[in-house]
Amino acid sequence: MSYLPCELHCHTCHSDGGFTVEQLQSAAKENALSLIALTDHNTQSGCAELNQAIIPAISGIEWTTYFGHILVLGAKKFVDWRNATPDNIDEKLSEVKENGGVIGIAHPFQLGSPFCTGGRFEFNIKNWEKVDYIEIFHEGFSKDNRENEKALGFWNSLLDKGYHIAAAYGRDWHSHKGSGYFGCTYIDFDGEPSPEKALESIKNGKTVASLGMKLYLDVFKNGRKYSIGDTIPAGKADFDIYCDVYARWQNYANILFSEIRIITNGGECIYNYQRKENVITLDLKPNHWYRLELWGLLDGKEMPLAVTSPIYTK
């Protein structure tokens, strides 16, 4: 298991970005990312220019509509988004899944009309099993970024309904411009990173949305090891937690790390972990989900800085 930093939401001059495709890939490599996804607005024209020798890259697209933005990664065939409506969206998502695509919800609480028309998610998805991941963090980490708080709560509500949906961070990367605290999505790779392995791990819920800190866990039960995204039997289990707050060193001058929290249904914190313990034993309830959150003070406000996708119980 090797969680590596990736960026799944990128734009180039093929839509509204400032990068050429080569410049985007070079910038990603300079930022020590292991993989990116090219998701230009409503076009895949730039995907033909991707050079896997620079950095592994997934061919994708961002469906940009008046009812929300949907990230489609790795689909084998083009699925026409132009007649997608709030009420037929399940049919469109089924087409994507039939063609091997991975589906993500971009910035569900981005400011909507009239400033960012269509940015807020208003599709009436009936079967969320078709959705693989949600951007619980979008753009910069900031005490003023309220959309992330809402996205985290929305994700919780879907987990509480029994859906297995992974967490992601989306920088929505358009150019070299911009300042602030930008993060990544850690994806679990077995061996060297590749688009195929990334898509499989996302589908299996093996992701971490983070400002840059690496956070993951293994769970041991009845002599067997489980990891993020897995479904395990209820009952007593040992949590083995790994945290590296300096995995992607940035300007952390204004960040004070506090604690790791174990969160379950309803967003309830059931354990506060002080990053000094080794293994924690918990009695896991049936039909629940459990995840880790690393909290800290950023510019004076306490907030989650890294969030793992959950493990689930039968």
Image: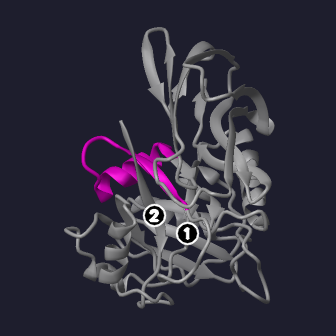
Q: Answer whether residue 186 is magenta in the image.
A: yes
Q: Which residues are magenta?
A: 183-207
Secondary structure state at the residue bearing disc 1: loop
> Which residue carries the number 1 mark?
171
Percent across and percent down for residue 42 are 49, 84
Nearer the observer, 38 or 83: 38
Secondary structure state at the residue bearing disc 2: strand
- Upstream in the sequence, badge 1 or badge 2? 2
What type is the residue that disc 1 sits on?
Answer: Arg
Q: Residue at x 46, y 89 (%)?
A: 18
Circles 1 and 2: CB atoms closer than 8 Å: yes
Q: CA distance from mark 1 to mark 2?
A: 7 Å
Is 145 left, or right, of 77 in this rendering? right
What type is the residue that disc 2 sits on?
Answer: Glu
Q: Answer whether residue 211 is magenta in the image.
A: no
Colour scheme in the image?
Answer: one colour
Does 164 appear above or below 23? above
